[in-house]
Image: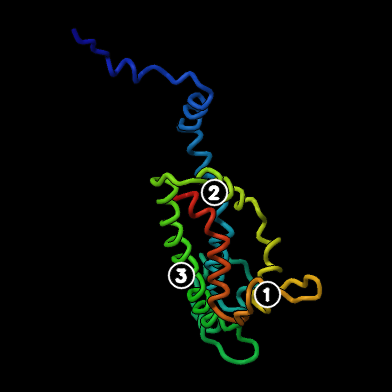
């Protein structure tokens, strides 16, 4: 004997939970219109900055960005100056953009690549101390980055040394990492590893 249920009738039963009622209220048409109006209002300053970036300095200083719609003018001089300008007043953003890419791409790939192995081990392997290591990993996410920046800087500049009974013990040798890209990659890897392992 088989029992059949009326699927349409089951789907029509509203979810009695608080989350279900809230979802129903937020998914009504009026709420969506209000959200889209707020999104458009929120984007107006961004649109103004974008339009101003294509106007001359004199126009930016004398008229509002909205006058562009009645008297449109278009120039790429601002972008040329910011990205490729030379001289004392030029910001040199082209070089800064390349430096950012040289830091961000490896600093993203390295932690994810290493975290994938650790996450696999936590998910599929049973080893002694696994629970304690996972608790340690999760608790590392609570350490503020600002607390470890100075010790990391000291580690990169001169290593880690401890004076004990008149002896200078080297815990971590000086690797002369100051001013190198590797030091930034290692910092990002260390800070991103707990979260990356947890998410993977």
Residue found at x 47% / y 27%: 24
* Mark closer to the chain start, 1 or 3: 3
Earlier residue among tags 2 and 3 = 3
Pick the residue in front: 166 or 139.
166
Whole-percent x, y for residue 192 in the image: 54, 59
Identify the residue at horizontal 46%, vertical 66% (top origin).
Answer: 110
Q: Is residue 68 above or below residue 193?
A: below
Between marks 1 and 2 in the image, the one whose residue lies nearer the viewer: 1
The residue wearing badge 1 is: 170
| Residue sitting at x 48%, y 25% | 20
The quadrant holding residue 190 is bottom right
Q: Which of these two is toward me, 69 or 161?
A: 161
Q: Position of residue 41 (x, y in %)?
A: 57, 50
Distance from Cα at disc 2 to Cα at disc 3: 28 Å
Q: Which residue is mark 2?
A: 133
Residue 63 at x, y percent in the picture:
63, 70
Circle 1 SS class: strand
Q: Is residue 55 above or below residue 65?
A: below
Q: Secondary structure at mark 3?
A: helix
Q: Is residue 77 visible?
A: no
Q: Position of residue 139 (x, y in %)?
A: 61, 48
* Front of the two marks 2 and 3: 2
Which of the 4 quarters of the picture holds residue 144? bottom right
Residue 65 can be seen, yes or no: yes
**Residue at the top extreme of this rendering:** 1
Q: Is residue 156 left or right of residue 198?
A: right
Q: CA distance from mark 1 to mark 2?
A: 27 Å
- Residue at figure coordinates x 53%, y 64% from the top left: 189
Q: Which residue is tagged 3? A: 105
């Amino acid at each position: 004997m088989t029992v059949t249920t009326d699927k349409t009738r089951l789907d029509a039963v509203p979810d009695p939970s608080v989350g279900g009622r809230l979802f129903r209220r937020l998914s009504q048409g009026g709420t969506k219109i209000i959200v889209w109006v707020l999104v458009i209002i929120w984007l107006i300053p961004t649109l103004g900055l974008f339009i101003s970036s294509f106007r001359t300095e004199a126009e930016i200083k004398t008229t509002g960005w909205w006058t562009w719609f009645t008297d449109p003018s278009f120039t790429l001089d601002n972008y040329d100056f910011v990205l490729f300008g030379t001289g004392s007043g030029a910001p040199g953003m082209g070089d800064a953009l390349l430096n950012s890419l040289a830091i961000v791409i490896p600093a993203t790939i390295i932690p994810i690549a290493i975290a994938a192995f650790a996450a696999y081990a936590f998910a599929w392997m049973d080893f002694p101390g696994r629970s304690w290591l996972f608790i340690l990993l999760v608790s590392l996410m609570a350490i503020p980055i600002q607390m470890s920046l100075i010790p990391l800087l000291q580690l990169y500049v001169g290593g880690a040394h401890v004076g004990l009974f008149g002896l200078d013990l080297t815990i971590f040798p000086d690797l002369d990492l100051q001013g190198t890209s590797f030091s930034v990659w290692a910092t990002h890897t260390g800070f991103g590893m707990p979260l990356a392992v947890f998410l993977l």
